[in-house]
Amino acid sequence: MTVIDSDVHLTVHPEDLAEYLHEPHRTHVSNTTYGTPFPSSGWDQWMGGKIDDNWSTFTTTEAIEEFCEEFHIDYPIINTFDPLGKFPQNELAIDLMRGYNDYVLDRILGENDEYKALIALATQDPEKAAEELDRLGDEDQFVGAYIGTTGSHPPLGDPSYDVMYQAAEDHDLSIAFHGNAEDFMFEFPRQNQALNKFLQVHTLAHTWSQELTLVSLITEGVPEKFPSLNFIFLESGIGWVPYTMYRLNKEYSIRRNEAPLLEKSPEEYIRESCYFATQPLGEPNDPTHMNGLIEMLGTENLMYASDYPHWDFDHPSGVDKHLRSHFSADQRKQVLYDTPVEAFKLDI
């Protein structure tokens, strides 16, 4: 079975990134004596060292190659993961956007044709994000755009982002949305202050930000305005999707005048243009319940993702045990290969 991993994270250390930035950001980012100007939540993700920080060492093509061999991944779709929407300094975010993308293009993609990557976007300035898509949209190994949903303001269905979505559609690039727990404080500051364990934040952050994004996209009519765009939701699992989809159907049936651009039910738009990565898959006490969730969502809208090398990554066998036990060979192939090919419009 050919396997595509739709969410592989590359670390770019500040000292390596600095040469791809302009001043004054080059000096600020490279001056590690006083730390970097990157916002931080202050949460202890590593439980005082009990959890290994593999993330910070996943920096080279050699590491990616070793991962692919060990996990039997044929095509990794790589992103640099720093959600740029959280940065209060717009000019820094825009320079980082260009720097990350140039780094990936220069240091990573040229090494292996099987590697695919996403163009990082800073949503603070949709015009600049559109220019970045125009600049890189014809590079064959870039197969989509990458947006951090946690911290982007206003929500990502807002019409101010139309220029960005238009550029993505013009270049036939899909949009990948990715939640983040560290940036919970920017999206949900009151809740972040009220909670006192990272376990609580990590349970809620990705899902809440992805729900916010999906509801905003659908009700603002983004799939209607850009019908050839695909929208991909990474690192929030799948349990939230049926609830949100059916809840939107209910609300839309009562308040259609508040979503005037829609010509179909929210569920139809979601099933036609939205795709969801498996990670983190979730662990019900009764594993048959996961089979039911997969059936509700549909294997044609589901794709495997590892989230490697984060400490909560999913091995392919995690979802594959459900696929082998309950679904057909064609459905298994959809999750591991066909759906990501369709979602990212891959030519492989």
Image (cartoon, rainbow, N blue to C red):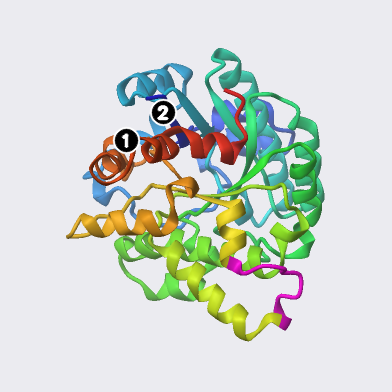
User: Badges 1 and 2: C-beta atoms under 8 Å apart?
Assistant: yes
Q: Residue 2 or 232: which is nearer the viewer?
A: 2
Q: Position of residue 176 (x, y in %)?
A: 58, 46
Can residue 43 be seen here? The reply is: no
Q: Position of residue 82 (x, y in %)?
A: 54, 44
Q: Residue at x 69, y 39 (%)?
A: 173
Q: Is residue 243 left or right of residue 176?
A: left
Number of labels in the image equals: 2
List the single residue furthest toward the left: 285
Q: Residue 28 or 84: which is nearer the viewer?
A: 84
Tag 2 or tag 1, which sits nearer the N-term? 2
Mark pair 1, 2: CA separation: 9 Å
Q: Residue 271 or 202: which is nearer the viewer?
A: 271
Q: Which residue is mark 2?
A: 3
Q: Indicate the quadrant where residue 22 lies.
A: top right
Q: Is residue 26 above or below residue 281?
A: above
Q: Is residue 68 left or right of residue 344?
A: left
Mark 2 residue type: Val
The residue stretch that appears in magenta: 257-266
Mark 1 residue type: Pro
Can residue 64 be seen here? The reply is: yes
List the single residue furthest toward the bottom: 254
- Asked if the magenta segment contains residue 263, the reply would be yes
Q: Which residue is mark 1?
A: 316
